[in-house]
Image (cartoon, rainbow, N blue to C red):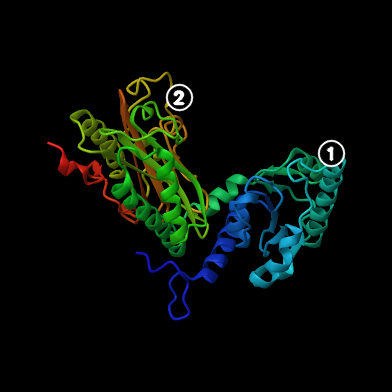
Amino acid sequence: MTLGLMAKDCEIRIDYDKLRKDRVRKTNEQMVKEGIATLLVFDQDWIRYITSTKVNDWANNKLLRSALMVAGEEPILYELGSAIAAKKKLCPWIADRMFPSIGTWRGAFPRAVGEENAKKFASMVKDHLTQYGVQNEPVGIDLSEILIIRALEDEGIKVVDGQQCLLEASKIKTEEEVELIETSISIVEAAFWEVVNRAAPGVRESDIAGFMRETMYRLGSEELQNINVISGNRAYPHPHDWSDRMLRMGDMLFIDVVSVFNGYKTCYYQTFVIGKPSSLQLDVYQKSYDWLFDAVAMVKPGVSTAEIAEIWPSYKEMGLSSEAEAFALQVAHGIGITHWGKPVISRFFSFDNPEVIEENMVMAFETYCGEGNDAARIEEQFVVTKDGMRQLSKFPSANLISCPCVGALLP
């Protein structure tokens, strides 16, 4: 369902203008539905969602940019000062609603400067709220610094949770969003193909993380938020990382990639084996595969997350002390411009707090099984259709893949 990596003058492909307008529309509609007059966002994903602007990865944890959105209005961007001139040329849809951000650089400024800047920022926000006539309404915030929150409160602004509004606004995907997610997935699959051909005894987990990054950046990934590469006796229990461990013959190897293409994320695990798999490895892999696709087979609009969670093994069956300790071994979650979005499916909370599956949600399902020195982790991505799911990820997972072609050398 992908059409190409680039926008073209001679084909519509992904209509980015429609994408920008749809995201603002969906946010506005959810704000009205929840009775939130104003949102003030600091998370880079949400800033991008409502303003269609970004700076590079270095800004992800700085809390230095933000965006203000009043229901029924176009958003305002508080941008890094030195980026404004470029943004006015490159982002004409918001050029006349852009102002220098005033913050603390997450506390790096001298304390007195940070405190004064927080007051200046809060005053600027209050002025804009007054211009729109919503100065007495609560402001929904996703995340921020204590100094900023206190300064807003000193201006008489009531701060409330805005995160849920944004998650609800983004959970149903447009056609353009689905295609962006699928394109992001296709780039990861090219990197998985490199693993099939290059993973061999002597190759380190860090080497795999490196050449996968090279492949994905070359094909258009703008950011790689995560590559877990886990092999051999590091695979059970799950460490969620990568190391300099060297692959050996007979190792199982599983890899997770959170890649970003034009803002849209993947969450994609695949498992391999170096050489021919043992019967134990095949059994571990099959359990993980069955848990995933038995759950997926239940998905359609109207089904609850509790019904799906029931398919998965309990923490006792996993040999753990609680569902909290087992959380994220068998899990499903929404995905889009955020890595994790609504709905989330887990035995940890879905029984007591079920949510309903809806058409055009995009979801990632991931399962894990381990025993001894072997473990398998599989994850696939799907879009919910009117009567089920359409699988977006296409790298073959029905069988455990041997790599490289050393299988032919073994008896």
Left or right of 212, for residue 67: right
Name the disc covering residue 323, or none. Answer: none
Please, which residue is most extreme toward the left here?
A: 411
- At mark 1, the secondary structure is helix
Find residue 100 and report its image quarter. bottom right
Q: Residue at x 83, y 48 (%)?
A: 117
Q: Locate the C terminus by quadrant.
A: top left
Please, which residue is most extreme toward the bottom here?
A: 10
Whether residue 335 is visible here, answered yes or no, is no
N-term-proximal mark, 1 vs 2: 1
Where residue 179 appears, x then y in whole percent? 42, 62
Q: Is residue 236 above or below residue 176?
A: above
Find residue 346 and report its image quarter. top left
Tell me the CA gap for discs 1 and 2: 39 Å
Left or right of 160, for residue 358: left
Please, which residue is most extreme toward the front here?
A: 202
Q: Rate crowding at label 2 as few (under 14), some (14 to 19) or many (20 or more) other CA atoms within 10 Å.
A: few
Q: 235 or 283, which lies in front?
A: 235
Q: Locate the N terminus by quadrant.
A: bottom left
Where residue 109 appears, x then y in whole percent? 80, 43
Find residue 250 and report its image quarter. top left
Where residue 71 appears, x then y in whole percent? 67, 59
Whether residue 135 is visible here, answered yes or no, is yes
Q: 136 or 3, which lies in front?
A: 3
- At mark 2, the secondary structure is helix
- The amino acid type, in three-letter code, at marker 2 is Glu
Name the disc covering residue 325, or none. Answer: 2
Left or right of 127, for residue 275: left
Q: Which residue is mark 1?
A: 111
